[in-house]
Amino acid sequence: MIRATKLTQPAAKAAKYVAGIRLLSSSPIVAAEKSSNAFKPKADRTQSMAFTKKDGGTKRVRSGTTTSVNMSSANPAYYTELPKPKLDLLSKDTATATRLNTFMQIDEGFLQSTGKGRYPGHLAADFKLFGKPALLYRQVTQTLVDQMAQNAQTAPKRATVLDGLNGAGKSAELLKLAMVAATSGHIVIYGLSTLPWANSSRPYGPGFKSDLFVQYELANELLRSVSAVSREVLSKVPLGKSVALGKRTLESGKTLADLVDIGLQTPSLSHDALDQLLEIASSQTVVPVFIGLDEVNTLWCKTSYRDQDDNVLPANRFRLAQSFLPFFEGKSLAKGWVVGATSYAEVRFMPKDLKTRLCPPPAIPIANPDLARDPGVAELPFDVVKVERLSSPEAWGLMQFYQKANIVTTPVTEGLVAKKWVYANGNPRQMFAGVTTYF
Amino acid sequence: MLHLLGVNLPDQKVVSVALTYFYGIGPLTARKICSRLSFHKECKLSELTEGQLNQLSGVLSEMTIENDLKRKVAANVQHLRQIGTYVGKRHAMGLPVHGQRTRGNSVTAKKINGTMLRKYSTVADTAFARQALGLFQAPLSRHQN
């Protein structure tokens, strides 16, 4: 017979404790919780638990919206065909003073060369509503076109930058100039938007054996647009010297078109090809060159890109910006013109000192010699052309076109034009917003 | 879905966001990794080449993340407990560690603190037991002392 021995106090406590555990662990509540815990899935943070995605095929990304209406059964009172006003194509022959205050069409092929569906500034909404890319031919446009014709013979010593308020028409003027230059036999190097050069939206990387960072994709795109617009003109200009690009060497008898082709075929040589193109084109006198950069302020800004040590990179640390900066800081072309257009849409890429120099505050007296020596108000290395508000005849031409394009359905009277013009303070974008919004 | 170092990363996410799916990597560290490897801000995981992915794996394997980091944190808490510090005792009791009030609030601390220690205990790991034995943990740890 086994004698039950009396347990010591701590041991008895421990025994009770263990018995309690056994009781608890065998209880139905605990058992239910155990079973529910067994089926509870572990939270997977990489997948949404709110809904399950269907398998099979990739998700189609819809870009833009389209509304399809069966016109045969549509109510004619509400659904009308989009009017297509006949417009002259803007070219060197049609860019004359007789076309002032009229709308002229921009060549679709020219716009496609810059990239499908890409338009400068905020013009995408305008062109969509017009049904075709078209811009108003203004007095400032005529002045710039005349200047370009002059510069095609003798290049000016300094570049020109178009400046003005938001929506004044800077990007539009640059686009018209580039269009006229393309039809005048210029080599056109047109940067539709330099914002991707600075806003960290495109691939970049450290250069090989260089402090500068490279952006092969952007350089390749620029070369592609140059080739698409100025192919014939490029084939007329000989290299004049033998050019080595990577492992290939081009003889002096080859043309700029061959140089651009190599840059296009080999993205890693895009920067070298672009640099050689700019060097040869700027020094030759066979054909004039037009270099146009929109949002040119990004050449002097602090970009959103970072180096390997996570420090913010200024624009001049990029090879692409370095290729164009000399033209805006004193280097001149042999024949042709360098034009830039500023943009205040992305304020973070407009350097403060450049903004002060472009639009000095009225409180600073220009006659003060001490302030004149201040680098903050020192002379800019380029000429500035201010794109001002629309004049009354231009506003009239704008509204006339809006009526033809069925954007304005009421009769266009002097009173209506004056009202829209005054409310918008002569700003073209505000006038467009004034006729397209209802509230 | 990209499987990298034991973690499933969503392909369509931007790299700097996808990297935060690793335990031990937050937005700042993710940004530093992207800067080091020259990935632009809008770069998605699906756009990375194999070479870039290998570079990314190399950088991540140099860092203490995921299970290594969890083990390190658990070891730190265990060390504090073993040397008998105030912080260690608070972890053991499952109470706030940084001097917060316990008269009210401290719900999060009671839920989270000492989780590392509970994984090392011999008590059955059920929610009910944890709740019930929260009261018993203190005297048990006193006995262990």
Image (cartoon, rainbow, N blue to C red):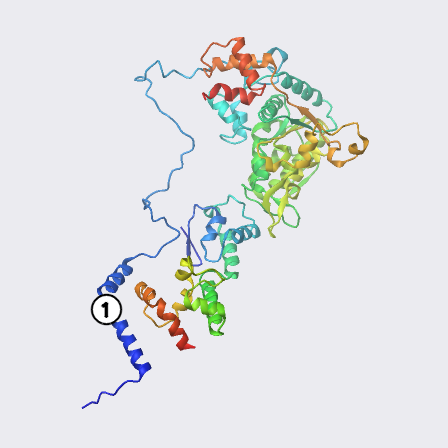
How crowded pointer 1 is (Cα within 10 Å; few <14, some 14-19, many 20+) is rated as: few
Can residue A85 be seen here? The reply is no
Residue closest to the eye, A432 or A439: A439
Residue A30 percent across, percent down from the top left: 26, 64
Left or right: residue A83 compared with residue A280: left
Which residue of the protein is positioned furthest toward the front in this rendering? B103
A288 in relation to B87, above or below: above
Q: Quadrant of residue A378?
A: top right
Residue A281 in sight: yes
Residue to which mark 1 is pinned: A26
* For residue A3, above or below residue A316: below
Residues A193 and A222: in front is A193
- Is A410 left or right of B126, judged from the image as shown? right
| Amino acid type at mark 1 | Ser
In percent of width and height, residue A357 lies at 70, 32
Horizontal side of residue A60 vs A227, given as left or right? left
Q: Is residue A146 above or below residue A23?
A: above
Q: What is the quadrant of residue A337 in the picture?
A: top right
* Residue at horizontal 41 percent and vertical 75 percent from the top: B142
Residue at the outermost left position: A1
Q: Quadrant of the C terminus of chain B?
A: bottom left
Q: Position of residue B131 (x, y in %)?
A: 33, 64
SS category of the residue bearing label 1: loop
Q: Which residue of the protein is positioned furthest toward the bottom in this rendering?
A: A1
Task: Pinpoint the chain carrying mark 1.
Answer: A
Task: State the count of labels.
Answer: 1
